[in-house]
Amino acid sequence: MQRTVSIVLGALLLSVAASAQTKAGPDFAGTWVFDQAATLANATAARMQPGPIFGESFVAEQSAATLTLRISAGTLQVVAVYALDGSVSKNVSPPAIQNAPAIEVISHAKWDAGRLIITSNSQSPSANGPVVVDSTRTMWLDATGRLVIERTGTPRTMVPPSRSVYKKVQ
């Protein structure tokens, strides 16, 4: 009887460990540069706009708990930290309108079948008052190890469906 209980407990522990491993995703850590040719082919095939969603290059740091993106676009520097367990992450985005206050962005990041899905909500200023912006960014590594980022959201004028491909340099 004790042997049966031990076997069942051992199988249960292995099952829980395997389940925990499948919930995690790939490691995005490193320095990534925009791959224009791969983006054009990939986005066209997906019927999405090609373009550098995270700028020409960015640095990703990843732990078991968080993903930190350090994005540089010209003189603009953006740092975003996402909790990978689906809990609330609060970040700040630079405003589209000069001299406007920074925009608070509320996000949730979770793994789904090896892809990281980040859903975000914010309010952007406009001439007609604040506009609610909802977006989803899905990130995954393709078969060649390139990072693919897909973005969708509303309103489509502010968040057109787009896709970027980056290659790792470090």
Image: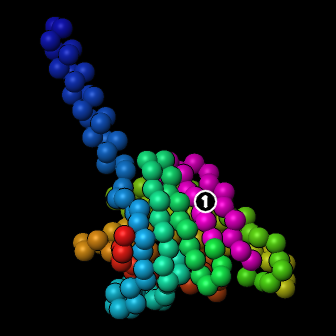
Relative to 110, residue 119 above or below: below
- Name the residue: 17% across, 20% down: 7
Q: Which residue is mark 1?
A: 107
41 or 29, which lies in front? Answer: 29
Where on the picture, by quarter, is residue 114?
Answer: bottom left
From the viewer's perspective, tell me whether residue 120 is left or right of residue 28. right
Most frequent secondary structure within the magenta stretch: strand
Q: Position of residue 9 (x, y in %)?
A: 25, 21
The residue drawn where x is 57% and y is 48% is 87
Q: Nearer the viewer, residue 42 or 57?
A: 57
Question: Most extreme residue toward the top, as rendered?
Answer: 1
Residue 147: where, in percent of width, then height? 37, 73
Which residue is depicted at the point 26% across and 28% down? 12
> Which quarter shows the C terminus?
bottom left
Side of 53 where 8 appears, left or right: left
Q: Which residues are magenta?
A: 78-95
Q: Secondary structure at mark 1?
A: strand
Which amino acid type is marked by label 1?
A: Ser
- What residue is drawn where x is 74% and y is 77%? 95
Magenta stretch: residue 34 in it? no
* Snapshot quadrant of residue 126: bottom right
**Mark 1 surroundings within 10 Å by alpha-carbon count, few (fewer than 14), some (14 through 19), many (20 or more):** many
Residue 155 location (% of width, % of height): 65, 80
Quadrant housing the N terminus: top left
